[in-house]
Amino acid sequence: MLNKKEDYHIHCNYNDHSAINLSVENIIKKANDLHLQTIAFTEHVRRTSEWTEKYLQEIEYFKNTTNIKILKGFEAKILPDGSIDCPETYLSREYFLIASFHTKYQDKYNWYNALLKAIRNESVNVIGHLAPDPEISLTDHEIKILGEEISSNNKIVELNAKYKRPPIEFIKIFKNLSVQFHLGSDAHSIEEIGNFDRINDLINFIEHCGE
Ligand SMILES: [Zn+2]
Ligand SMILES: [Zn+2]
């Protein structure tokens, strides 16, 4: 079951493109107001990021001010070779890691193979806003293989409210393969936290169709 009181994808003002008031403290306040049960801090990281320790300490500090379950983590880019753009230190089970595509891929098989490698990566928990570039189309069989790999590697597929992903044809096939889903607002502002209105159709499809 999808739980709208859990938001597994929230950014904060450690990057340069989120709202300035999107501080760790304000995120927790908002989550309290919304009576959320679980939130994941998943700031954009790169191998070269230098703010990470401060960010983690800040979360650790404010974690004790609330009963909400708080996950400390990152969203990191899937690189063309299938590796994850995240400092080695955080590639461990201790941190909640979303792997996402953030660059355009011209070549379908490069994209597909990078994705398979990310799915098989033990440090990755979630595949974020999964969808191929518009130029790339996958056969049902190719989507099925992805779903089987996701299931057997115990990865979660995020239903992303910012990008309204994954596409419904992926969800249909994944659902039949018992892939696990959860919700991520991908909030870059306070108002977006815990707001999944934009993907009500995807949520309804998972919960009510094709039983
Ligand atoms: Zn992303
Ligand atoms: Zn994001």
Image (tube, helix red, strand yellow):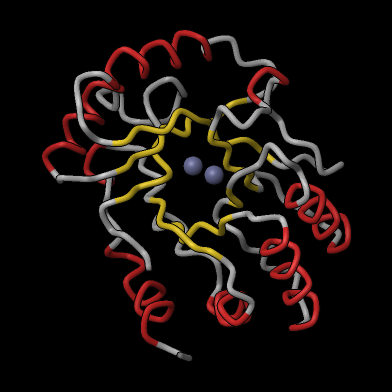
Q: Is residue 209 left or right of residue 31?
A: right
Q: Is residue 206 left or right of residue 100?
A: left
Q: Quadrant of residue 62?
A: top left
Residue 34 vertical position relative to residue 150 in the rendered view, above or below = above
Q: Residue at x 69, y 61 (%)?
A: 150
Residue 28 vertical position relative to residue 211 in the rendered view, above or below = above
> Residue furthest toward the left?
33
Residue 32 vertical position relative to residue 2 in the rendered view, above or below = above
Query: How many labels sit on residues?
Result: 0
Residue nearer the viewer, 135 or 191:
191
Residue nearer the viewer, 53 or 93:
93
Q: Residue at x 36, y 13 (%)?
A: 58
Residue 54 on image: x %, y %: 45, 8
Residue 167 on image: x %, y %: 55, 72
Q: Residue at x 64, y 55 (%)?
A: 154
Residue 15 on image: x %, y %: 47, 24
Residue 159 on image: x %, y %: 46, 61
Q: Quadrant of the C terminus?
A: bottom left
Q: Quadrant of the N terminus?
A: bottom left
Q: Residue at x 76, y 54 (%)?
A: 115
Q: Is residue 196 left or right of residue 177?
A: left
